[in-house]
Amino acid sequence: MLSIGCRVSHLLIILSMLAFAGCGPLESVSSETAGKSFSAYCSDAVAYTSGITVTGTAKYEYRIEGNGVIPNGHNAFKPSATTGTFSLRLKVTHDAGTVPDVIETKSYVCGGTCDAETVVDALTNEINDISTGVENVKAVGDRVLGITVASGYSLEVDTLQGFTALNRKPIRYAEMRILDSSGKTAQCAQTDGSGNYSFKLPQTGKTYTVQVLSRANNSKNTAYVIDTPSNNSEYAISGTVTATGSPTLNLVAKGTGDLKGGAFNILDQILNAQDYLRATTEDCDNTFAQCQPFSIAPLVYVYWKKGVSPGIYAGVSGPISYYLTGQKELYILGGVNGDTDVEDMDHFDNSVIIHEYGHFIEDQYSRPDSPGGSHDGDSIIDPRLAWGEGWADFFQAAVTQDPYYRDTYGHVDCVGATCATNASFDEYLDPSGGSYADKPEAGSDGEGNFREFSVARLLWDVIKDSGVSEFAEIWAAFTGDKSMETSSDRFKTIGRFHAIQRALTGATNWSTIVGDEEQENTVRDYGNPLEFGSCGAITMAIKKNAGDNGSPDTSDQFRRNDFYIWDHPGGTLNLTLSWKDGGVADLDVYVYKKDYVYGTTTGRVASSDTESTKTFGTETISKSLSAGRYIVNIVGYTGVASYLNTSTYTTYYTLKIDGTKVCPTY
């Protein structure tokens, strides 16, 4: 079954192709047909060893925190040190070209340990003294947020000594293509880790077009950001040089207009993710014998287009970003129906981009088992889904080192009553006490295994500054020998992950944070293996929550469901469920294959769900099944007990297979 990890609007949604009628066949592109390889389109390029040298820098504009905290055309930067020289170069250019460039260098020497705001205030005064082009500077706190230029002028901030640019970043390790006047590829190159590039051309005096592409397939990054599955075209920023002298060409992908900055931001976030994995797992096998250091990921294809929701490829009408499991394809939201002012967009929402890439990492390095289905920040959900989404929520926080899941829509430049300026969905993954979304009920040991953000919070607690371990330990349990990847149990949850982590050589004790999140560090509450034995009756305390109408959509999977694993040898499965000695109850039993979707017929192979309003009852199944691993789901049906409101009632049941009692392992 193909599944797609999705995010609709500001909620996280996962759909399954086979479970939702609205999610039709996806237009898939294989790695053999999606665009040409670097070597293919550079096959005719000449490796010039002499001639002129062309140099330059490639950067992209982006909106800070998704929808932006500074207006279009402004520059933002802040001090990156507390002592030394702070300087920058301002290049003011008249758009019509009739006024020569005005380059003025302004600096402020600290002379000791300085407060960042003091540096910014002093430099702001210096910038305001520029005579041509610059009208005013806005400083807020420890950052300069806007330099307004006069009408008809453009401004570029460069050479930031002692400062970090906030809204321009280098385009790192990207492929480049240099075309001659006929459009033939004459040379190829690549930007470095600072966005700089250098290449040679013959000194002919001819004009060449220099392109920086939204592609990388090297030892640092492996991603192609392309437009649509049918077109398969990468994005490019370009300019021209004349092959004489020592030409320099600086290129910028804009964060507005054609929005190519969005494509390059997606590319850069994938690089950030891979850099994080390399840095945190380097030599990890010296600490955890099972850990396998990360080097470089397989190539991923990322589809993004300005104003387009990729839901159109999946039969989904709303805004959506998703990863297509098994296909190495990410789909990132570029807007809706051409709108990039008011609607949701994800090309600058780094949380969303890296979250979806986290699904890719799980797909390639572990063994995803998410069944699909809706989910949000305050629901008890299928623990397989909670694990998959919780992992991706955590992964983006780990890479960004910011314990928020942030999804914005609209942007700061939008003007009008319909604008959603600076609107966003923020989920804090590092709360301290109090009430917050997805918080398990106190004393409900095991409930956290069924909550997405609980999974994410626990993993964040492992690695944060005051955490108990490091990412390498998570990685060791996530992938490689004796990990989530190699576990024979196809029903992956945080409970299974805890069991694997505890078995690591040199494992850290996570019991405190497991308890804080009301998690169970075994598979007791989900995927508990059944075995023949002589156990007593199993207690089921069924709670009817507010809004529970008895249907699967409202069923509390933690409080009125038990999930067991049965390894069936093949042939007829004869299963008997009996209950008695409790309040009025109605228990049902369902048997599912490994790819089941809870509460639906997808993956269901047998069931018995006759209605009962008594204090005792029996359900039986006799079904010929192939050999394999199955989930046996005992459900406390509350539809017949509507009068109980939010009360809890207890019943006791036994399970028999072929007439012999079976018992849970844990």
Image: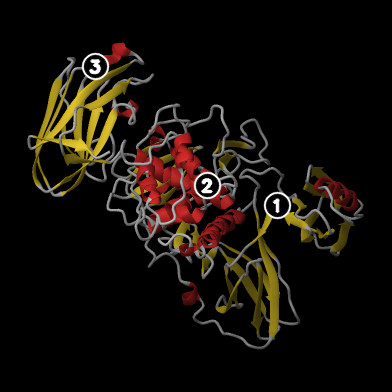
Q: Nearer the viewer, mark 2 or mark 1?
A: 2
Write down the quadrant of residue 544 in the picture.
top left
Left or right: residue 485 versus residue 304 is: left
Q: At 79% across and 56% down in the image, what residue appears?
A: 155
The answer to which image quadrant residue 111 occupies is bottom right
Amino acid at circle 1 = Leu
| Residue at the top extreme of this rendering | 643
Q: Earlier in the sequence, mark 1 or mark 3?
A: 1
Q: Is residue 332 above or below residue 217?
A: above
Give the colour scheme shown: secondary structure
Q: How far apart are the two marked residues, 2 and 1, measured between alpha carbons?
A: 32 Å
- Residue 166 numbered mark, or none: 1
Amino acid type of the residue that numbered disc 2 sits on in the rendered structure: Val
Secondary structure beneath disc 2?
A: loop
Label 1: how many Cα within 10 Å (few below 14, some 14–19, many 20+): some
Total labels drawn:
3
Position of residue 575 measured from the top left corner of the image (x, y, whole percent): 12, 35
**Viewer-proximal residue among 31 and 502:** 502
Frontmost residue, 404 versus 7: 404
Inspect this view and state whether residue 212 appears: yes
- In this orientation, which residue lies closer to the viewer: 248 or 578? 578
Query: For the residues marked 1 and 3, what is the alpha-carbon distance in whole angstroms?
Result: 59 Å
Q: Are marks 2 and 1 in contact (CB under 8 Å)?
A: no
Task: In the displayed orientation, state which residue is furthest to the bottom.
Answer: 50
Residue type indicated by callout 3: Val
- Which residue is rendered at x = 32% and y = 57% of the image? 486
Report whether 656 appears left or right of 349.
left
